[in-house]
Every structure is written in structure tokens, then in C-alpha cells.
Amino acid sequence: MALRCVGPRRSLLSHNALGGLWPRAKAVCSGAAGSEEIEKKLLAFPGGSVDLVKKECGIAVLTISNPERMNAFSGTMMLQLQEQVTQLEGWREGKGLVVRGAAGTFCSGSDLNAVRAISNPEDGVKMCKFMQDTLTRLLRLPLISVALVEGRALGGGAELTTACDFRLMTPGSEIQFVHKHMGLVPGWGGAARLVRIVGSQNALKLLSAAQKVNSSYAEQIGLSDGVVSPEGGTLVQTERWLSSFAGGPAPVVRAVKKVVLSGRELPLSDALVAERDIFGTVWGAPTNLEALARKSKHK
Ligand SMILES: CCC(=O)SCCNC(=O)CCNC(=O)[C@H](O)C(C)(C)COP(=O)(O)OP(=O)(O)OC[C@H]1O[C@@H](n2cnc3c(N)ncnc32)[C@H](O)[C@@H]1OP(=O)(O)O
């Protein structure tokens, strides 16, 4: 049984998926407070949808869908993405997430019609802050996430791939930070995340040349974690690949993501405190006690 969450039910609330760890460690992401004005403007650019299916196995599939515009993000899709991230923050049974585009392509970034209409710097910065907040929350979900890149991931679409823990690409697919060709730089947090994924040298090359990154080059520089072939279904294969990381009891999988996240984002002293707190949630818990009773050997 899959639970489908489609549509524009919206919340202005900001959530902390790590249950209080981040405020103690000084959040880089201050939440969506004060974003009402840009949210109203985004509502004026409708089209497409961001659809979420949560499966009983603990894996969810988030689909960016606006096929007539190569899955470009309309204003309402940005709002829906925020709502779906809120849904996932509240999903206690969740373990894994696949982010993909509809109709065989990933996402062509922001809808250029909306971009043209809010092309003044003030609105641009507000839109960036809104998307940065949503994508930071996406990356911080206590779920192991993978972007399934088919076709093109351009501009904001390329930035979206970096808000997942992993990326898988199909042969012939491309990730391209086209921002420089548009007279821009990434603004949805994609540059900061890209540097952490591929290092500053590679990030500088990809951004300054607006380089097209195919599946083999992406794997070579660590941007992609593998190739999925179309035979057998790309989503099925991606879910199978993800299961090897997101398999097992939800509390343990979620704790694994949380310790890695705190190690990745926090200064060492804060990360050590966070790790102890997270450890305390699994130590002596049912899965740990069962493993002890089994006298597990790890041969
Ligand atoms: C955060 C910063 C950003 O994201 S800035 C936006 C960066 N993205 C872009 O500039 C993408 C521009 N689009 C393209 O380069 C091409 O359309 C790509 C995606 C390569 C597809 O080329 P091709 O396969 O030939 O299809 P096409 O150009 O005929 O496109 C089909 C229809 O989709 C539309 N489309 C595409 N991308 C967008 C977009 N980002 N915003 C709005 N519309 C987009 C095209 O205009 C085209 O529509 P139509 O059929 O002409 O009505």
C-alpha cells in the first residue's frame, strides 16, 4: 500500500527533522520565517506538481512533474516542494527517498517565465532564500536520499540533485550548472553543496565552464554514485540500490543518517555531542537487544 500526497496543501511552519539538535549547534538554516511575501508571489506562477508517494517499505518517491517545460519549477511547485518536505519530516517510519523527474527527464531549473517576472534582485534573493531553506531541510531529512537523474538536470535542477545524499544517473543523462550562461551563479545552495561533494577544484570547473557532466565524468569526480540502465526500469533499480543502504529497522537507518549529517555540518565538538545523543536513542533499544541476544558474528 502506498500513500500518495499530491497537491498544494501548504504550511508556513519550519521543521527541524533532527529534533532539537540543530538549534543547540547554531543552525545555518533559519527556517521559513518571514517568507510569506515571496510565497504569495510564487502562487502567481502556477503549473506542474511535486508529487510524493510514501511506501510501506519505508521508501518514498518524490516526483518533479511539469513535462511541458522539461519539469521546470513553477512558483506553485516551489511551494509544493516545501509542503512535501514537511510531510517527510513528519514521517516517522521513513528510511529512504528517491527524487526524480517525470517523463524521462530530471528538471530544467526554475521556470523561466517566473524568473523573468521576478527578475529584480530583491525578489530573486527572497526566492533563493525560500529554495535554500527547503533544499536544506530536504538534505537534513533523517532519510537516505538519492536523486535519479534521467535526461537533463539543468540550473536549479542540478542544484536539486546536490540536496540528496546520493546521485544515480542513466547513460546519456547530463547534469549541468548552466547558471553562468544565464549570467548567474547558483543560489539555491547548490554551490556550497557541490563544493562539499566534488571539492572546490571540480566545483570551480563545473560552474565556471557551465560544463555538461555526463554519467561517466560524474562518477569519476564523485558527483554520481553509479549508473542505472533503462533495462528493468530505472525506478525499480534505484529503489533496489537504495535498499542496500536504507534496509533494516527505521530507528537505526535514521540514526545512521543523523550521525553522518551532524558530522558533515557541525563543528567537531558539537558533532560529538550530537553523536552521543543519537547513540543514546539506539543503545539498548529493541534492535540492539535482539542483536545482542542473537550473539551476532560479523564474518
Ligand atoms: C535557479 C536558476 C535556474 O534554474 S535558471 C533556469 C535554467 N534552465 C534553463 O535555462 C533551461 C532552458 N531550457 C533549455 O535549455 C532547453 O529547453 C532544454 C531543457 C535543454 C530542453 O531542450 P529540448 O529538448 O530541445 O526541448 P525544448 O527546448 O523544446 O523544451 C521543451 C519546452 O520546455 C520549455 N522549457 C524548458 N526549460 C524551461 C524552463 N526552465 N522554464 C520554462 N520553460 C522551459 C521550452 O521553452 C519548451 O517550451 P515550448 O515547447 O517552446 O513552449
Image: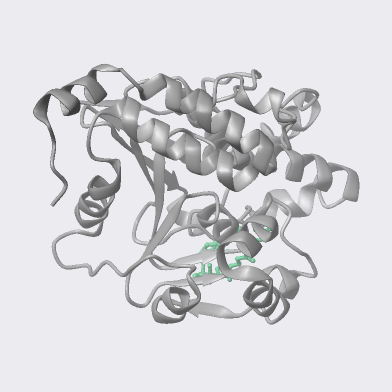
Q: Is residue 283 above or below residue 113?
A: above
Quadrant including the N terminus? top left
Q: How is the image coloured?
A: one colour
Q: Residue at x 24, y 54 (%)?
A: 241
The percent coordinates of residue 12 (x first, y second) are 66, 19
Q: Seen from this angle, which residue lies furthest left?
A: 294
Residue closest to the eye, 208 or 83: 208
Residue 148 image point, x, y percent: 37, 57
Instruction: From this view, report whether residue 175 is shown above or below residue 124.
Output: below
- Residue 174 as seen in the image, left or right of residue 206: left
Rendering quarter of residue 22: top right
**Residue at 30% over, 17% down:** 285
Q: Quadrant of residue 96?
A: top left
Q: In the drawing, does residue 163 fall left or right of residue 120?
A: left
The answer to whether residue 277 is above or below residue 126 is above
Residue 284 horizontal/vertical position (percent): 31, 18
Q: Determine whether, in the image, residue 289 is placed left or right of residue 98.
A: left
Determine the image quadrant of residue 202: bottom right
> Toward the viewer: 105 or 57?
57
Q: Residue at x 34, y 56 (%)?
A: 103
Q: Quadrant of ligand 1?
A: bottom right
Residue sitting at x 55%, y 57%: 157
Residue 39 image offset from top left, x and y in percent: 71, 29
Image position of 44 (left or right of 61): right
Q: Is residue 218 visible to us here?
A: yes
Is 209 located above or below residue 6 in the figure?
below
Is residue 91 something that shows in the picture? no
